[in-house]
Image (cartoon, rainbow, N blue to C red):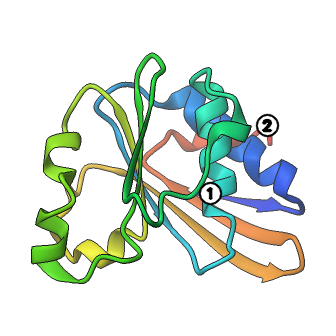
Amino acid sequence: MAKLRSRSPAETETVGFRVGQMLSGGMIVKLYGDLGAGKTTLVKGIARALGIPAEFVVSPSFTIITEYESSPRLLHIDLYRIDGSYDLESTGIWDAIGSDAVTVIEWPEHAGDELPDDSVIIRIEHLHDDERVISIEGIDEKYWHNM
């Protein structure tokens, strides 16, 4: 597991960019962190790595799933408002997961244990002000030594 320290939103987005460079179609990223931790900021970096302008990325809290045209496509899923299996089923998430897209899921814990285990896991811990610790599992740790 890699642990990185971010001291600004720009650094958090840069971590996302580096993650995005390592992702390919069909991969799932589970993104954990409290409200305001910087999850969507990290997704902006992933999107930028896939050729999507960061300013196009917004939290899909109300739409649940936002699809961005890129190569591979990016699916940004926010399960914050999901409560249990019935709600999860109604999102259309199963049509998205396993596709050729990169799928980033905020609040994956709201899906219980229904999401695939074979995923990249990112946890963002908000320390204070703009400082965060970002833990990344599922991407070769050697990649992070230069950050």
In this view, the residue farthest toward the top is: 71
Q: Nearer the viewer, mark 2 or mark 1?
A: 1
Residue 145 found in image quarter: top right
Q: Is residue 95 above or below residue 22?
A: below
| Residue 93 in picture, x, y percent from top left | 21, 52
Looking at this view, is 1 or 95 the one in front?
95
Label located before the other in sequence (2 or 1): 1
Residue 38 found in image quarter: bottom right
Q: Is residue 102 left or right of residue 7?
A: left
Q: Is residue 29 above or below residue 69?
A: below
Q: Report the number of numbered marks.
A: 2
Q: Which three-letter amino acid code belongs to the residue tagged 1?
A: Thr
Looking at this view, is 21 or 59 the one in front?
59
- For the C terminus, the image quarter is top right
Crowd around label 2: few <14 · some 14–19 · many ≥20 (10 Å): few
**Residue at image coords 73%, 78%:** 126
Q: Is residue 125 above or below residue 62?
A: below
Q: Is residue 82 above or below residue 8?
A: below
The kind of secondary structure element at disc 2 is loop
| Callout 2 touching callout 1 (CB < 8 Å) | no
The kind of secondary structure element at disc 1 is helix
Whole-number angstrom distance, CA of label 2 to CA of label 1: 24 Å
In this view, the residue farthest toward the front is: 62
The residue that mark 1 highlights is 40
Residue 121 found in image quarter: bottom left
Looking at this view, is 68 or 28 the one in front?
68
Residue 146's tag is 2
**Residue at image coords 69%, 29%:** 53
Q: Which three-letter amino acid code belongs to the residue tagged 2?
A: Asn
| Residue 84 in picture, x, y percent from top left | 18, 82
| Residue 48 in picture, x, y percent from top left | 66, 30
